[in-house]
Amino acid sequence: MVGHQTLLMLCMISAGSFVDLEVTTDGPRTIYEGTVVLEATRAEPDPCIDFTIDLPKGDMAGPVISSDPGQPMLPFAHFVDDANRLQVWWCSFRSPLMGQSHYSIPRNFVFHVTRTEFGPEDLEKLLGDWGLDDSAWDLNLDGVVGGEDLGVLLGGWSSDDGEA
């Protein structure tokens, strides 16, 4: 089941710049996908966005289909992942306006956070997707739901009394 959720997002934004973010949940994953647009002008030729969001507890990674599977895809100037908070700086320094008074610089990003604690309902869902090659329950990101994913799930098993 895919759902939408709200999140805390703090931004320090250059005039005219903006963040377009979509957050969805798919099984054990919370997916963050969007675009940052830096707006450069003659008055502000070095636009920046300081973007901070709180993330759920889990492992941050990128989509299975990427140039570096399992790694977040964030075209950024700098980022810090600290205690379930992600802070990203997108900047364009000394951008040549080439005679223009205004131009936009888009930066696309996508990453997800996969939960690391699981329970009985998660086991049922993983087994239901067994053998599928396009599933959020591919926990080890090898492209198919199988035995290694079951091992990841059991390794993060959490009982109802809070013991892992």
Image (tube, rainbow, N blue to C red):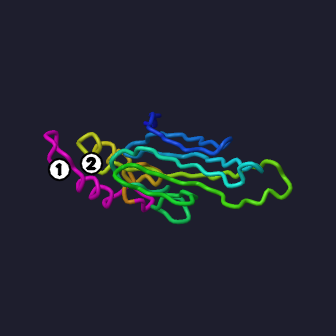
Q: Which amino acid does label 1 sit on?
A: Ala
- Counting from the top left corner in percent of width and height, residue 100 is at 84, 52
- Residue beneath the point at 46% across and 54% down: 133
Of the pair 112 and 138, the residue shown nearer to us: 112
Q: In which quarter of the image is residue 92?
A: bottom right
Residue at the far bottom: name it.
68
CB atoms at circles 2 and 1 under 8 Å apart? yes
Q: Which mark is residue 152?
A: none
- State how far apart marks 2 and 1 are (Cα): 8 Å
Residue at the far front: name it.
43
**Magenta run includes residue 73:** no
Helix or strand or loop: what does disc 2 sit on? Answer: loop
- Residue beneath the point at 55% across and 44% down: 12
On screen, residue 69 above or below 130: below
Chain-order first, disc 2 or disc 1: 2
Of the pair 148 and 55, the residue shown nearer to us: 55
| Label 2 environment density (alpha carbons within 10 Å; few <14, some 14–19, many ≥20) | some
From the image, give the main secondary structure of the stretch colored magenta.
Answer: loop
* Residue segment shown in magenta: 141-164
- Counting from the top left corner in percent of width and height, residue 113 is at 41, 50
- Residue beneath the point at 13% across and 40% down: 161
Circle 2 is placed at which residue position? 117
- Counting from the top left corner in percent of width and height, residue 20 is at 60, 41
Q: Which amino acid does label 2 sit on?
A: Glu
Of the pair 49 and 36, the residue shown nearer to us: 49
**Magenta run includes residue 143:** yes
